[in-house]
Image: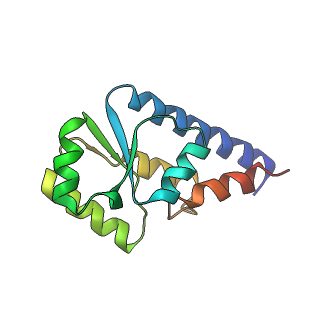
Amino acid sequence: MKIENKQATIKNIDDFILSLNDESTRNSIVIVEGKKDVEALYYLGYIGKIKAYHHFRGTTNFIDRCAMNYNKLILLLDSDKKGNAITKKILSQLNGKIIDLNYKKKLLKITGGRIKKIEEIKSFYNYISEK
């Protein structure tokens, strides 16, 4: 990756995190799959509300505990078979209400599709930050 592209990608990731932080001030929450995903976002500077889907016992428990308490759920689940299945399950039970998938799409675009799992964003960021 060329240095100019690296710098642009770093800026785009930083802007992505700032945007997530801004969303958090408006009673939104980021939903990821697990602990490593949470750690990766915090590492990059995310300071808002975040929950790991796997801390809930199923989709119904997730909806009862989480979806009813926030204006928007920002789903940043992995772009693999498991993550896509969870996303579909959540969307079907909430009929797409209060769900935001745009950040997941933005992240895929920013990383050129290189990041399939949210936890990988930390090592990707460190890699492109190296001189």
Identify the image quadrant of residue 33. bottom left
Residue positioned 81% across, 52% down in the render:
130
The answer to which quarter of the image holds residue 97 is top left
Q: Residue at x 66, y 58 (%)?
A: 123
In front: 108, or 80? 80
Give the vertical position of 125 relative to 88 (above or below): above
Residue 75 at x, y = what percent?
35, 50
Q: Is residue 11 visible?
A: yes
* For residue 13, side relative to residue 3 (left or right): left
The image position of residue 111, as x and y in percent, is 58, 55
The answer to whether one can see residue 96 in this image is no
Q: Which residue is drawn at 53% across and 38% down?
A: 46
**Could you say where residue 59 lies in the image, as x and y percent from the top left?**
20, 60
- Location of the N terminus by quadrant is bottom right
Residue 129 placement (x, y as % from top left) = 76, 48
Identify whether 54 is placed above or below 23: below
